[in-house]
Image (cartoon, rainbow, N blue to C red):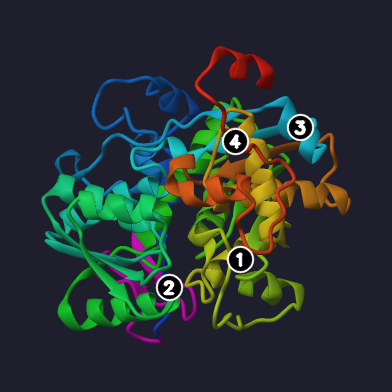
């Protein structure tokens, strides 16, 4: 079947290879599948038959949809742990907090390295293996580095991660180090690290695995494929997603566009892309109806996973918002951490950036954009253990500029039964 890489700016097409930027204009690529060919090969019944399969690679919630992810890759080239098959949760505390009667949380923190990044990384590393690559790299605020390091190690590849010095949660840094990546701490922020890894990739022949790599986006489409399957092939009214480098926003729009064209869904859900107030260039671009993004030079937010001032996928993300009649919103660190506390106390748990989705859903209900009776799915992007310092410091009231609405402080007691009795 024919698959091409198409520049989103000039439209020039290329054969799938190790490139990730257009040689004509410098734009980034979409993977363009032959949907007419795919339509004859797939069905809801086929994908449902693979649910619960022990057969490789269909145990994976990504490769269960392989025809829609990367039909060129062979079984021997697929690197999978497996990933996906993440659960949908609801809880009365979150319902009460947001005011939404039918709110669900899809917990991507249940992936092997604790975040949604594993879905894109299995596709990206598998493509690297197909191409015969031995050295891969990424810039990261944490989760991408953890995921790439793990999958590269499984594939027998060397990996290098470029991280902003002092700007990464220890839970994520420890993963990258433990999985064997060479860690470069870059003086500056994520955008500085991203610029350096791109230059290194071009000059040194390193295979780049940030979401500028179109195969990462292809893997992340599976979040929506799986969600629709979990909802018995029906669409929610809204999907609300945290937004940093905008890979998920980009992937979700592409997923729904393809699902509709393949007649696997009847309606495309609306997508709400939620940024942190201190790292909100996409929100500003959308709100001001600009055609060009103005980067935030020094982004600042407690939600380090979305602390990005110059997102590489903003054009694809803007296309998603237009396609889905969606919206872009911003939430403060206060709103993020309070929403996180509610999610955590529901027994579900998440890292700070994940809670932007629930905080955003609450804000959109209050503004009247989302009706409280609509069916809303919030994407929880990372595991609660990714950033334990933020959790502890929230409850202790030690986060600058944040007054915890839902603190749960430890109580110091004497080692006696009477002390226990008096407290409880």
Foreground disc of the pair 2, 4: 4
Q: Residues within 10 Å of mark 3 (few under 14, many from 20)?
A: some
Res 168 → quadrant: bottom left
Side (left or right) of 412 relative to 386:
right
Along the polypeptide, which appears first: circle 1 or circle 4? 1
Q: Main secondary structure of the magenta part?
A: loop
Say which mark, if any, is on residue 344.
4
Residue 82 seen anywhere in this rendered image of the structure: yes
Q: Which residues are magenta?
A: 1-25
Q: Residue at x 62, y 75 (%)?
A: 281
Looking at the picture, tell me which residue is in the foreground, 363 or 288.
363
Say which mark, if any, is on residue 190.
2
Looking at the rendered structure, the secondary structure element under dot 3 is: helix
Residue 235 seen anywhere in this rendered image of the structure: no
Rendered position, 331 above or below 26: above
Foreground disc of the pair 1, 3: 3
6 falls in the magenta region: yes
Q: Label 1, on which residue?
A: 319
Looking at the rendered structure, the secondary structure element under dot 4 is: helix
Q: Label 3, on which residue?
A: 95
């Amino acid at each position: 079947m024919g698959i091409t890489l198409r520049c989103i700016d000039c439209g020039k097409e290329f054969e799938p290879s190790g490139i990730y930027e257009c040689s004509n204009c410098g734009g980034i690529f979409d993977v363009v599948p032959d949907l007419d060919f795919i339509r004859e090969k797939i069905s809801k019944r086929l994908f449902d038959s693979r649910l619960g399969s022990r057969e490789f690679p269909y145990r994976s919630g990504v490769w269960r949809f392989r025809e829609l992810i990367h039909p060129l890759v062979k079984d021997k080239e697929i690197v999978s742990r497996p990933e996906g098959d993440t659960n949908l949760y609801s809880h009365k505390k979150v319902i009460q907090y947001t005011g939404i009667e039918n709110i669900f949380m899809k917990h991507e923190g249940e992936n092997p390295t604790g975040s949604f990044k594993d879905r894109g990384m299995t596709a990206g590393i598998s493509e690297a293996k197909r191409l015969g690559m031995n050295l891969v790299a990424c810039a990261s605020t944490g989760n991408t580095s953890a995921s790439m390091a793990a999958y590269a190690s499984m594939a027998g590849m060397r990996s290098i991660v470029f991280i902003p010095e002092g700007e990464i949660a220890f839970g994520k840094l420890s993963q990258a180090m433990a999985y064997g990546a060479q860690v470069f701490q870059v003086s500056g922020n994520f955008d500085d690290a991203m610029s350096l890894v791109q230059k290194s990739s071009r000059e040194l022949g390193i295979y780049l695995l940030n979401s500028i790599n179109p195969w990462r986006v292809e893997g992340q489409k599976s979040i929506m494929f799986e969600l629709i399957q979990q909802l018995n092939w029906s669409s929610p009214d809204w999907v609300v997603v945290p937004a940093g480098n905008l890979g998920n926003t980009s992937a979700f729009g592409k997923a729904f566009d393809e699902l509709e064209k393949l007649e696997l869904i009847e309606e495309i859900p609306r997508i709400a892309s939620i940024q942190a107030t201190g790292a909100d260039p996409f929100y500003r671009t959308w709100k001001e109806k600009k055609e060009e993004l103005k980067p935030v030079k020094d982004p600042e937010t407690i939600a380090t996973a979305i602390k990005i001032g110059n997102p590489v996928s903003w054009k694809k993300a803007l296309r998603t918002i237009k396609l889905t009649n969606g919206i872009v919103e911003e939430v403060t660190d206060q709103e993020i951490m309070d929403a996180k506390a509610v999610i955590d106390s529901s027994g579900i748990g998440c890292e700070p950036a994940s809670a932007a989705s629930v905080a955003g859903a609450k804000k959109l209900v209050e503004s009247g954009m989302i009706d409280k009776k609509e069916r809303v799915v919030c994407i929880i992007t990372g595991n609660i253990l990714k950033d334990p310092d933020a959790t502890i410091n929230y409850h202790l009231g030690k986060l600058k500029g944040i007054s915890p609405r839902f603190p749960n402080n430890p109580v110091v007691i004497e080692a006696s039964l009477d002390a226990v009795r008096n407290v409880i």
